[in-house]
Every structure is written in C-alpha cells, then in structure tokens.
C-alpha cells in the first residue's frame, strides 16, 4: 500500500528545462502547454514585478494540501456531487519528472464516504502554480504561519514549501494536534505549564480549515431509503409525532417557526432504522444559566451526528437498496462516530502495472467475478483505503451558515450555537432584541463575565455566521468580521497544566465521551430562523511523530501500563493513545472503535514532540500533516536557506477544453492570495 509517506512537497521552478516531459508516450500538447504557460508567466512577471524580485514555482506533491495542491485529480462524487481532490503525485517521479507505472484509480468523498472508482484514464492535473516573493524577508521578519519556500536542509538543490510555525529561540511542543511554544531564554526548565498554545490569526485559519460536512450536498436518494440524516431535530427524536425544525430544498435548508411548536405536528413517516448508539446525550437544556424555566421556554435543538456509511453499506446504497443486514436488524452498526483527521486528498487508491504486491487496486477493489477491468470499469466499487481513515479524534471544530432571524420584542428570545470537545460544551448565545452576544462555557460562569459583545441585528436580514472552538479560543465571525470580546474568547487558563503537575479544570488530555457523538448543535427559543449553507469544518491536526518524539509524554492521564498508540501502523498516521488499541487497521474495526464511548479511555492523550530552535532557525510543517515530511523528520530550517514567501496561486490548473483533455481554460475562481 503506497501512501505519501515520502511526500516532501518540493517545489519546482516554472522553467521548461527543469520540467521537460521525458515520457515518449505523453501527448505533445503537454510540452506546448508548458511553453505557453512559461511565456505567459514571464510576461506577467515583467509587467507586474519590476519593483521587487519574484519567481514562479509549481507544487508537485500534496504535503501542503488542501491549502496548496500537488499533482491531483479533480473529482465530483457520484453520490452527493461534492467536488474534491485526490492526490496523484505518485503518477510522476519527482526526480526525473517521468510518468511512473502507478495510476490512481479511486478515492473517497469526504462528504458522504463513498469510495469512487474513476478509472485508469481519468485525467490528472499538475499542481498549483504559485508566485513567490523573494524579497519579502528583506523588508520584514518571517512571521509564524507564513507559507514559505526554502532550500532543503539536507539537499540544498531542492526547494521545499511549508508553513513556518516555529521562530528562532523557541521551544516547540506538538501535542493534542496543536502547537505549544515558549521562548528558550525566558524559561530554564522544560515545564509543560510554561508553554503557550500557538493560535492562528483569522486570515490564516480560514485558509486552513478543512471540511467535515456540508449540508448543501445531501443524499436524497439514500434518505428515501429511510437512512438517517446527519442533522436531526431533537424534538422528533424524543417525540416521534412532533417536529420543531423543518427542512426545505431537498434537505439543504432548515427552518424554525416558533408558532409551529405550539401544536402537535403530524409526521408523514418515521425512520425505522436506528443507529447503534442512538441514545440522546444528557445535556443542559438551558444554556449557561441556573434559572428554572417553563416548558414554553424550551430550547429546540437541531443537532449533528457524524454518520458515515461504510464501504459495504455503499455497495448496497449505491444501488438504491438498504444493506441486507441493516434491513434484517433495523440497526446501522458503528454509527454515529467521532470526527477524525481523515483527509480526502490522501484517499487515492492506485493500480501499479509492474508491481502486483503493491497494487492497492487489487487489495481494495471489489471485483465482480472475473470481469475485465478494461471493458467493465463501471462494475467496480471500492473499499476505503485503511490508511486514509484518519487515526486522530478532532475536537477543534467550527460551524458556519447563512442565517435570517426574526423575533418579537421580548428579551426571552435567543439563538445558541454549541460545540462539544472532550465532553465539554462551548456556546455562543445571540440575543437579537438586546443587540447582545455572549460566549459561554457551562459550569464556568467567570469566563462569561468578560465574553460579551454588542451587535445590532436587523429583523429578516441575512447574516453569514461562523462560530469556532479552535486553539482553546471561542471565536465568532459575522459577515466576514470577527467580533471582539474583552477576554478574546480565550480559555487556555482553564486548560494548561497547573505548576504542581495536576490537571486543570478543563484538562487538555480529557477523553471524548458520548456528548462528542453530537458535537455540533443549534438551539432556538421564542424566535424564527432560516438557515442555509450549513457547514461543519475542522482545524488542522498536527501529528506528533518523528525522531524528536519525547520518550516520556508529559501529562498522561491514564496511569495504565497498557496505554499506547491507537494503532502503530506507520509513523505519522496517528499519535493518539488509548488503553484499548485497535487490533488491526481495518475499516470495520476502526469504525467500531470510533462509535463506542466505552473504548475511549485514554484517547484524549497523545504522544508529544519537542524541538528546540536556535538563533536563525525556523520550524516548518506541512498542512497535510499525515502525508508530509517536514521539520518533524529532518529538523529546523536555517535562515540562509530561506527563499521567499508564497503569495499567490496564479494557475490552479485550467478547465478542460470541451471535447479534449487540454486544461487550458483559466479557472479564475481558484486563483487566490496565499496568507
């Protein structure tokens, strides 16, 4: 099984001499395209960059995905039509630039979990072509989170591109998927309580967030089979003859009218299928208050559960039928599940003509009898690649939507967004008639006293809202503007280890529990709301791996000699620890673990990496942490190796000319600034 374990994300200069195609079987149009693009780039540089030095590079591999993409395939999911990318960099040898014998023939949709076979002849596209400002660091210091090009420390002739996360004279600890930093000259001892979490400024964070679920891409054909939807109305779960939240436009929009909940609403049909873990979690019905309220003041919740059909489920669902086992029992096994760091870009399944032992296609494709692949491509369906399942639970989430709200002139109406991490609720409460927004952590009233902001809401006006719980900070963005709170929404003082070595009130290594199976919710009381473009996103998860892994991980909560890696398949896949590791890396086994709260003892713990930076040294990591060779492996980057800052994707590969395989039509929508 081939994975981008050697993905070094080197960048190649946009020069026909260094990028010539040596494969005689490739189309002559490729060489013509290279010449045209190079001439266009040269003209563009001459006109626009007279005042400073700039150079164009191409990204060959995917260690910076999804921020920057290497050679890849563009895919539209056959089931939900969600567009995504799958790495195809293994189809080209990065040293010789010649085509290999490997072909990426399938990949898994991050939206619905369907593993799609797109065939031997599906087109692959070159990586993003970027502009790099080589004079940036002559005028300012390199900043944390800058995407930078530098020469490889071990091989200075090779250019790498990574995100710089560590600065000179710092100690960097990678743990819990986050980065923790302290100045070396300020602290003598390696005390874990001295480290501060490294937070991403909003402009960087918005480019780094990765999709979990987008309600704009439902599965109506599957839901017609009474397969449960991911967003569900809690009222209907408790009372099957009541419905508080209604859906519109094939389930892509959600509507709540307070007048509808006064009477019993007849439900046309109630789904007979049940999830394996379908018990509603016990939650505080009232957000951040001890005041007792009446039934009329009830909050009506729209909640999300991460329901992922398995490969075997899809073998039936793709043919518009319920799997026989589910039809017989009425139970959908191994669902809902925890959210993990699975990335669609890393799900590619390959076929290698010259090496059957490493032919992922033969291992993970369901073959219909002895039908020939060349003549019966559509008869093939695929199992998910085990190494693409994502070995690390993620609790740093964001929810975004377009929302229109209206309510009477009463102070009792409000809307609440809720995110869960490690069994702890984190909330954002919006009071439209009071022009007030509050952040809250139930059980910690002191936090809320300095987490208030004024904001005027207009009735029946649409607002674009994003609520985030990332890097131990609650953040709210409305219409692309971040709302300012007195305490900035930071709660790391409740999380960082205490100086005496004891865990804090909300310890960083707390285990997930049943609440994490419904990690995102929207609640409403005494008002109306329309919601569209509802999305759930997650933060990048930095995996602690490599030679700098600390032999004794600080702050391990479970004092158990059996606490070890979830699955030690290969370095870089997972750093999460557990007292009940999974026995084998198989889809069914891993899904069973992710759906079973009784198996999560110790799963809040991770390994840790500690790296020391001297004067003039930087730490560089890839955004695609599970498929990136970076400073975790080969150490720090000396200042002398810095080339410049990437600042613009000028050619994210073009669109195909109709009737051809020539991607010459510019894709203007994907041209973008790089922060």
Image: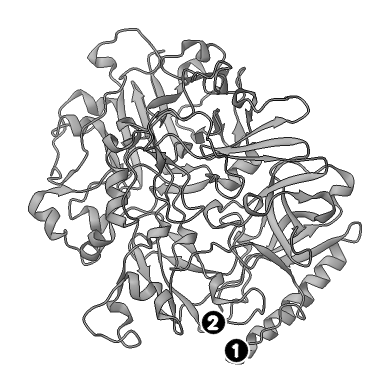
Q: Residues within 10 Å of mark 1 (few under 14, many from 20)?
A: few
Furthest residue in direction front, as rendered: 561
Q: Is residue 644 left or right of residue 338?
A: right
The structure residue drawn at horizontal position 32% and vertical position 50%, both measured from the top left corner, is: 590
Q: Are marks 2 and 1 in contact (CB under 8 Å)?
A: yes
Q: Is residue 635 above or below residue 56?
A: above
Q: Is residue 209 above or below residue 651?
A: above
The x and y percentages for residue 224 are 20, 54
The local secondary structure at tag 2 comes to: loop
Dot 2 or dot 1: first in sequence order is 1
Q: Depth check: give the residue in front, 347 or 552.
A: 552
Q: Which residue is mark 2?
A: 661
> Residue 161 shows which numbered tag?
none
> Residue 27 shows which numbered tag?
1
The structure residue drawn at horizontal position 46% and vertical position 39%, both measured from the top left corner, is: 401
Of circles 2 and 1, the one toward us is 1
Furthest residue in direction top, as rendered: 291
The x and y percentages for residue 567 are 39, 50
The x and y percentages for residue 665 are 61, 74
Q: Depth check: give the residue in front, 530 or 125.
A: 125
CA gap, disc 2 to disc 1? Answer: 10 Å
The local secondary structure at tag 1 comes to: loop
Q: Quadrant of residue 561?
A: top left
The x and y percentages for residue 544 are 55, 44
């Amino acid at each position: 099984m081939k994975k981008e374990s050697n993905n070094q994300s080197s960048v190649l200069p946009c020069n026909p001499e260094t990028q010539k195609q040596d494969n005689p079987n490739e189309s002559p149009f490729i060489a013509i395209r290279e010449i045209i693009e190079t001439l266009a780039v040269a003209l563009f540089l001459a006109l626009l960059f007279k005042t400073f030095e700039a150079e164009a590079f191409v990204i060959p591999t995917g260690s910076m995905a999804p921020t920057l993409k290497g050679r890849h395939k563009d895919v539209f999911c056959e089931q939900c039509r969600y567009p995504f990318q799958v790495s195809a960099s293994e189809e080209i040898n990065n040293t010789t630039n010649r085509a290999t014998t490997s072909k990426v023939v399938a990949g898994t949709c991050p939206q619905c979990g369907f593993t799609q076979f797109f065939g031997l002849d599906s087109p692959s596209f070159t990586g993003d072509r970027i502009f790099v400002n080589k004079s940036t660091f002559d005028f300012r210091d390199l900043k944390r989170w800058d995407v930078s090009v530098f020469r490889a420390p071990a091989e200075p002739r090779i250019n790498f591109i990574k995100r710089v996360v560590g600065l000179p004279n710092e100690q960097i600890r990678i743990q819990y998927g986050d980065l923790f930093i302290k100045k070396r000259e300020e602290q003598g001892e390696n005390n874990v309580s001295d480290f501060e979490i490294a937070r991403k400024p909003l402009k960087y964070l918005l480019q780094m967030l990765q999709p979990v679920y987008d309600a704009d891409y439902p599965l109506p054909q599957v839901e017609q089979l009474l397969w449960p939807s991911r967003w569900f109305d809690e009222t209907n779960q408790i009372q099957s003859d009541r419905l508080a939240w209604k859906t519109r436009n094939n389930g892509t929009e959600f509507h709540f009218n307070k007048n509808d909940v006064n009477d019993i609403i007849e439900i046309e049909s109630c789904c007979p299928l049940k999830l394996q873990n379908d018990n509603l979690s016990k939650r505080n019905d009232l957000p951040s208050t001890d005041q007792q309220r009446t039934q009329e003041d009830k909050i009506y919740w729209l909640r999300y559960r991460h329901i992922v059909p398995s490969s075997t489920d899809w073998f039936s669902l793709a043919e518009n039928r319920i799997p026989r086992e589910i039809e017989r029992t009425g139970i959908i096994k191994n669902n809902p599940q925890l959210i993990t760091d699975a990335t669609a870009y890393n799900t590619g399944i390959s076929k290698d003509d010259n090496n059957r032992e490493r032919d992922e296609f033969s291992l993970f494709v369901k073959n219909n009898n002895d039908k020939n692949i060349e003549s019966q491509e559509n008869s093939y369906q695929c199992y998910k690649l085990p190494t693409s399942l994502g070995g690390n639970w993620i609790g740093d989430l964001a929810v975004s939507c377009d929302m229109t709200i209206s309510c009477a002139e009463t102070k009792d109406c409000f809307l609440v967004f809720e995110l869960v991490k490690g069994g702890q609720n984190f909330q954002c409460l919006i009071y439209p008639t009071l022009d007030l927004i509050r952040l809250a952590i139930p059980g910690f009233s002191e936090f809320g006293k300095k987490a208030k902001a004024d904001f005027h809401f207009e009735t029946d006006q649409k607002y674009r809202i994003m609520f985030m719980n990332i890097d131990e900070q609650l953040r709210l963005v409305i219409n692309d503007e971040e709302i300012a709170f007195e305490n900035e929404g930071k709660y790391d003082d409740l999380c960082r280890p205490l100086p005496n070595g004891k865990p804090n009130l909300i310890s960083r290594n707390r285990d997930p529990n049943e609440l994490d199976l419904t990690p995102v919710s929207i609640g409403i009381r005494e008002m109306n709301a329309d919601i569209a473009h509802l999305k759930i996103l997650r933060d990048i998860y930095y995996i602690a791996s490599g030679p700098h892994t600390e032999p004794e991980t600080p702050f391990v909560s479970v004092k158990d000699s059996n606490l070890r890696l979830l699955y030690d398949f290969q370095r870089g896949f997972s750093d999460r620890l557990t007292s009940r590791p999974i026995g084998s890396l198989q889809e069914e086994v891993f899904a069973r673990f992710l759906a079973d709260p009784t198996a999560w003892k110790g799963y809040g713990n991770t390994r840790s990496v500690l790296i020391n930076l001297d004067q003039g040294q930087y730490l560089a990591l890839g955004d695609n942490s599970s498929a990136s060779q970076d400073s975790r492996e080969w150490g720090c980057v000396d200042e002398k190796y810095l080339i410049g800052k990437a600042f613009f994707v000028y050619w994210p590969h073009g669109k195909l000319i109709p009737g051809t395989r020539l991607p010459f039509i510019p894709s203007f929508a994907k041209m973008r600034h790089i922060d």
